Image: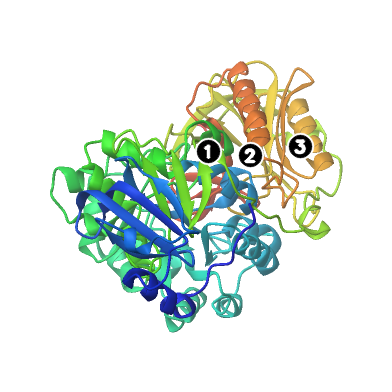
């Protein structure tokens, strides 16, 4: 189906009024459904919806006066008519897909609006990469709003990115048609300490009348938290418990509760509404990070809404958190988020408000999906060679690049170790006593090696450290060019030779994820666009991602969605311990620390 451009409200107002008054015929009328009204939090049976110019003209018990000889009619037959679902905070790149293929994957799940922060590609390609994401997003048949990335690097001085985002970049992007605000302000210490660059980015956003996204990844809820809120961020998705949620909404922030592929933070925070009775208007549901396997096999925002309901949330409240609440937060209440006159005609038909099967999806007045099948084209940008040739190692790596030399004369050593926490973004700062064999420190038991390989400037740099929690066994290695947020290459393994093989393989294919065991490649997910995304169909990428998960399990890993844990091991803005191109970083103090310590 051809995508029809959406007229603005001023361009369509005359006809909308005429259709509502019965002077003109609607393009489409949905008849006999239960109107899920997210403004009044009501279920209103036996209602019709009249649509013209891609917008809603009339909602009421009888829309026969809006029907003409060329009006398309859809019989709801008592099904629920739900506003199209909105993802309040997400990163398209985490789906391993370009915006077009991401849209193709989530439209059948009822997602018609997304608020996306492409800070992953910003770290690799800078403002040019953001513009490419923005432009392809604008081409889609659903609403993909872009937040201008704020923090590349996320923690200046603690990592080196391919490009840096400047206040001038932010000010320029605020004039682009699809920019809705500033992406998550991850450099919370910078805001707290009055960093001039961070405050300039926030000022450019607020001067444009747009929303500043937050990222406060700290358990401290006293003066530092207050200072961060005073700096301008209007929402936050890094809370993990009820106390976090309550603190944020009390200070005037929107609490974005996430259910991604590996982040399960809804259940622990929604009790602020279901048990403590806080006003749900300040709560928004989001995914943050969902990989392609989750999107294809489990769903997108429909999955999050179902999960919130299963956690005790009233279905109407859960739907508000995924429709009108994010729309209001971003200043788009008159455009999206509800089934009311003047808004974009984004409507889901579903026969069950709790299980939420997505039977028909309408976006901008067109049927875009039916019974799980996409019914519209999702156009692709012509991604240039500069976006496809981004893995530069400097030289072919060997096992010696992954050696960790031991102190002279020692036979054992104490190491600082990154501890993976299942289903959460934070890690633990652990210590382990490790053996020394032939002058090299070796992993033992649960502890294996991790390396960050520089891939933007061909420096040949490799930072080595240790990680615990994956459970890998035998001689294996896993490498990925998805390494939030600087997106160098992360290699985790039990054998240095396998680590070199995995890293070199990704250089050959232009980026992605690979797993080697005993000299053989078990899985490969090619991500040729910036080393982050594929422009292949989502089902194909998801199948390769499933094979990757199976390969991780075959190597002994039993963690839920361990790939997401792998990809965040270099995220130097979330406690406690991370790896970057400068070394091992203690995110509690934002300082580089030594890998090895003397035994007591």
Whether residue 294 is situated above or below residue 573 in the rendered picture: above
What residue is at 33 percent from the left and 33 percent from the top?
355
Residue 477: image location, x then y, percent: 69, 27
Residue 323: image location, x then y, percent: 35, 55
Residue 353's quadrant in the figure?
top left
What distance separates the C-alpha of mark 2 from that of mark 1? 8 Å
Query: How many tags in the picture?
Result: 3
Q: Which residue is mark 3?
A: 503
Q: Which residue is mark 1?
A: 295
What distance separates the C-alpha of mark 2 from that of mark 3? 25 Å
Q: Does residue 470 appear left or right of residue 547 in this picture?
A: left
- Towards the viewer: 353 or 491: 353
Pointers 2 and 1 in contact (C-beta within 8 Å): yes
Q: Secondary structure at mark 1?
A: helix
Q: Which residue is mark 2?
A: 538
Q: Does residue 127 appear left or right of residue 38 in this picture?
A: right
Query: If you read the primary sequence from the N terminus, does the residue marked by circle 3 or circle 1 appear first?
Result: 1
What residue is at 60 percent from the left and 74 percent from the top?
166
The answer to whether one can see residue 163 in this image is no
Q: Give the number of the mark in front: 3 or 1.
A: 1
Q: Does residue 593 appear left or right of residue 554 in this picture?
A: left
């Amino acid at each position: 189906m051809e995508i029809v451009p959406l007229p603005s409200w001023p361009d369509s107002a005359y006809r909308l009024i005429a259709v509502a008054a019965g002077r003109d015929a609607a393009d489409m009328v949905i008849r006999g459904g239960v109107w899920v009204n997210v403004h009044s939090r009501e279920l209103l049976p036996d209602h019709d919806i009249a649509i013209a110019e891609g917008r809603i003209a009339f909602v009421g018990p009888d829309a026969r006066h809006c029907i003409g000889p060329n009006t398309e009619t859809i019989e709801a037959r008592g099904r629920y008519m739900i506003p199209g679902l909105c993802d309040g905070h997400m990163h398209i790149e985490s789906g391993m897909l370009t915006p077009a293929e991401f849209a193709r994957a989530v439209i059948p799940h009822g997602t018609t609006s997304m608020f996306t922060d492409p800070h992953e590609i910003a770290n690799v390609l800078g403002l040019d990469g953001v513009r490419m994401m923005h432009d392809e997003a604008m081409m889609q048949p659903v609403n993909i709003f872009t937040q201008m990335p704020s923090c590349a690097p996320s923690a200046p001085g603690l990592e080196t990115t391919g490009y840096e985002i400047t206040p001038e970049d932010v000010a320029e992007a605020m004039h682009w048609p699809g920019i809705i605000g500033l992406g998550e302000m991850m450099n919370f210490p910078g805001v707290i300490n009055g960093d001039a660059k961070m405050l300039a980015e926030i000022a450019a956003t607020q001067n444009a009348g747009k929303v500043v996204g937050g990222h406060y990844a700290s358990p401290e809820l006293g003066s530092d938290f207050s200072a961060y809120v005073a700096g301008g961020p209007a929402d936050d998705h890094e809370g993990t418990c009820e106390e976090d949620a309550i603190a944020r909404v009390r200070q005037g922030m929107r609490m974005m509760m996430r259910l991604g592929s590996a982040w399960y933070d809804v259940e622990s925070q929604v009790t602020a509404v279901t048990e403590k009775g806080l006003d749900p208007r300040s709560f928004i549901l989001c995914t943050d990070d969902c990989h392609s396997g989750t999107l294809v096999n489990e769903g997108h925002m429909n999955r999050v809404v179902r999960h919130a309901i299963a956690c005790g949330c009233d279905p109407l409240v859960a739907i508000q958190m995924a429709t009108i609440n994010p729309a209001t937060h971003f200043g788009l209440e008159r455009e999206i988020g509800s089934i009311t006159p003047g808004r974009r005609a984004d409507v889901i038909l579903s026969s069950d408000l709790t299980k939420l099967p997505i039977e028909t999806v309408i976006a901008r007045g067109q049927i875009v999906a039916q019974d799980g099948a996409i019914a519209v084209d999702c156009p692709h940008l012509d991604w240039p060679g500069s976006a496809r040739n981004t893995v530069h190692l400097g030289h072919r790596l060997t096992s010696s690049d992954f050696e960790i030399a031991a102190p002279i004369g020692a036979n054992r050593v104490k190491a600082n170790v990154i501890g993976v926490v299942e289903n959460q973004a934070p890690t633990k700062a652990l210590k382990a006593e490790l053996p020394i064999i032939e002058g090299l420190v070796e992993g033992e038991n649960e502890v294996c090696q991790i390396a960050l390989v520089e891939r933007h400037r061909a420096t040949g740099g490799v930072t080595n450290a240790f990680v615990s929690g994956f459970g890998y066994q035998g001689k294996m290695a896993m490498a990925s060019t998805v390494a939030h947020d600087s997106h160098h290459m992360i290699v985790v393994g039990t054998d240095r030779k396998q680590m070199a093989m995995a890293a070199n393989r990704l250089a050959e294919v232009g980026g992605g994820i690979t797993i080697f065991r005993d000299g053989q490649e078990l899985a490969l997910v090619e991500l040729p666009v910036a080393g982050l995304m594929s422009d292949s169909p989502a089902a194909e990428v998801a199948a390769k991602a499933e094979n990757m998960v199976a390969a991780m399990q075959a190597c002994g890993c039993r963690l839920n969605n361990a790939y997401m844990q792998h990809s965040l091991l270099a995220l130097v803005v979330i406690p406690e311990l991370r790896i970057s191109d400068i070394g091992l970083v203690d995110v509690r103090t934002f300082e580089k620390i030594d890998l090895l310590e003397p035994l007591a």
